[in-house]
Image (cartoon, rainbow, N blue to C red):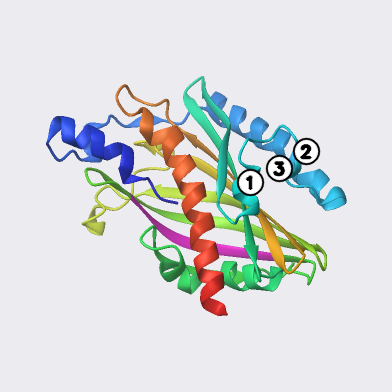
Amino acid sequence: MRFSPLAACVVAAAFAVTVEASIIPIVHLDAPALQAFEKYVAQFERNVAGPYEQTGKLWIDESSCCTKKGGFAAGKPVVEARENTDIAGGSIHHYSGALRIPGATIADVRRIMQDYTNYPKYFKPDVGKGSGTKDPDSTPADEHFTAQLSLIQSTIWMSVSYDCTYDTHYRLYDPHRWESVSTASSIKEWRDPKDVSGGYYPEGDDHGFLWRTNTYWFVREREGGIDLELDSMTLSRTVPTGFGWWGAKRTHDAVEKMMRDMRAAIQALH
């Protein structure tokens, strides 16, 4: 995931200084915020992710989903907000994206997503390093992976880095429908991204920019190409005054960039 520099340019120009994450107070992840996020995720899985197995319908198919279906048909990423809400002790951000990639296949997406060691190439500069292993309970229809990724989230005036562990299932429902469900089971923020000797902040007692994240890819193969839907939902601290861009815009731009990166990686295969 990437924190877009676009909005930060405005702030940086106004203050004309370099600001470090350390100016933001450390906050604690409280149980009510975590419970609210888990409830939101469960509702999404019940109402959206679950039915996909049976219907194969994507968000872009709904008549009321957006006003940019023409862009989707033309192969342009379409991104819209599903939720941007402050809750007790935190904020939930959820964006959905859709992209049509002519000539691509489910096998292409699967190859890219399971090639963890090359994530720094596919998703640069947002991933510093990656690795992953297939778990013993994997089946051909439900491939289960545990992955470690180092995330580099930065703007021209702030940098925050994490080491994350993800629990991911890749499920093939039929030759034309596939999904990826990824949950971050551990997110550890480095105290100093430039000096790892300082170690990590305790999980849940850090700057709170990224406490939890769930990512869903729905892939539908049809008419000589694929339709992608990407849903990203994050739990972060309540956005401090003056940092509104960090939550909603961060997630919006991350979804759009991940789709563009996926398209570029697939095109490089052919």
Which residue is under mark 2?
Answer: 46
Q: Toward the viewer: 19 or 33? A: 19
At x 59% / y 32%, what residue is drawn? 37
Which label number is shown at residue 70?
A: 1
In the figure, residue 225 lies in which quadrant? bottom right
Badge 3 amino acid: Trp
Q: Secondary structure at mark 3?
A: helix
Badge 2 amino acid: Arg
Q: Secondary structure at mark 1?
A: helix
Residue 31, relative to residue 117: is it above or below? above
Classify residue 182 as left or right of residue 187.
right
Classify residue 268 as left or right of residue 196.
right
List x then y, in percent, for residue 180.
67, 57
Which label number is shown at residue 129?
A: none
- 2 or 3: tag closer to the N-terminus: 2
At x 53% / y 44%, what residue is drawn? 213
- 2 or 1: tag closer to the N-terminus: 2
Residue 110, relative to residue 65: is it above or below? below
